[in-house]
Each structure stands twice: as structure tokens, then as C-alpha cells.
Image (tube, grey):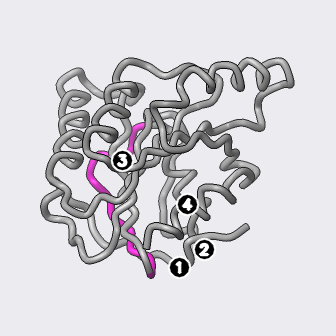
Amino acid sequence: MKNLGEAIFKSSYQTGKDIPNDKPQVCFLGRSNSGKSTTLKALIHNSSTVKTSKTPGHTRHINVFESKNFYLIDLPGYGYAKASRKKKGQLSDKIYSYLSESTGLSAGLLVIDCRRKLREDEITLSQIFRENQVPLILLQNKYDKLNQKDKNELKKYNKEIDPKFTLIIQVSAFKKTGYENLMNFLLSLH
């Protein structure tokens, strides 16, 4: 599988305005249990750079990884994390502040578990990206867990939501499949 090459952990940031913008930024969004960090690991050569946890919700800051052509922005997960209501609100605020303050955002990757439908906050995210004319790719993760009936239902559902996204791609971070279209799209950004 093609990947984005080597990446190093650059730093953790509190706000988007502090992140360098001398390269395109690709941000990773998703609920705390969607496989967001695992997906990021699948896209880079030295995957040990990105830490993942068995307990969802460990990304609390804006973590930035630098590859040759991109800054890969791992935003805090939302929704599922075992955190207080106040802490969950702060995590959502971080996501929205990044989206409004970043000057280098070139694309977003919204990672969801393909066994569920989009929620209202994810529809809102897609609207923000469309209004700002920034591509948003929906990555339906854990595709390897679906049987044929579920795959057919997902295909029908995707026809309904297709206009909200630049691309919809089914992936399996576990099996590292389905990333070819995503890689081609990302490599076309620089």
C-alpha cells in the first residue's frame, strides 16, 4: 500500500492558529472510538510515531505530525470519551477553534465506524467544510466487519449522503485496505 512516507511528531497545540502553515494541513476528525488514530497510523510509513490506546478518547490536544508534504493534524475525538460533560465540551471547542483558526487547512478526513449512520454534529462538520470550500472525505472505517447485507445497506445509505462529502471511502485500518483512492486524493493536494 502506498503511504505518505515518514512522519515525525512535531508538537501538541492548544489552538489551530499556532500550527505552522508552510505545508498543507490534513486534519483527522472522528468520534473517540472510530479508529481515527489507527487510520492515521495506516497512512504513514513509521506508524509507531502515532500512539493509539485500547481506551478511546486519549487524544486531548491538537497533535501535529509532519511528513515530507503535509502536516497531519490529529484532532481530539468527540462523543464517546470517558470524560466529564465540561471536558467533552472543551474537546468540541478545540475542534471548532482549529477549523476556524487554521490558515493551512487543505482537507479533512472524517473517520466513522461504518456500522453506524452520521450524527447531527457530523452533518454540521460537513457543512462547515463545504462553506469554507475545503474538501472533506468520509472514511467509513471497520469495513471488514460488515457482511454482504450490511455492505448493500451501506451502499444505499451512501447515495443519500454523497452530496455532503468530496469522497466517501470504505476502509479497514486493521487490514489496511481501501486507502488507494484516499492516497491518490491526498497526493494531488500538494
Instruction: Specify which label sits upstream in the sequence, 1 or 2.
Output: 1
Q: Label 3: few (<14), some or many (≥20) within 10 Å?
A: many
Q: What span is in magenta?
A: 57-68
Q: Give above or below for 5 relative to 63.
A: below
Quadrant of the rendering where the N terminus is positioned:
bottom right
Are discs 3 and 4 less than 8 Å apart at CB? Answer: no
Q: Label 4: few (<14), some or many (≥20) within 10 Å?
A: some
Are discs 1 and 2 less than 8 Å apart at CB? Answer: yes
Decide whether residue 103 is among the magenta residues.
no
Looking at the image, which residue is at 44% across and 33% down?
Answer: 31
The tag on residue 6 is 1
Residue 58 is left or right of residue 53, and the answer is left
Q: Which residue is mark 3?
A: 59
Q: Which residue is mark 2?
A: 45
Instruction: Indicate the position of residue 61 as horizontal and vertical percent values.
Output: 26, 51
Identify the element where label 1 is drawn.
loop
Q: Which residue is mark 4?
A: 185
Looking at the image, which residue is at 43% across and 74% down?
Answer: 190
Identity, as a three-letter code, of the amino acid under mark 4: Phe
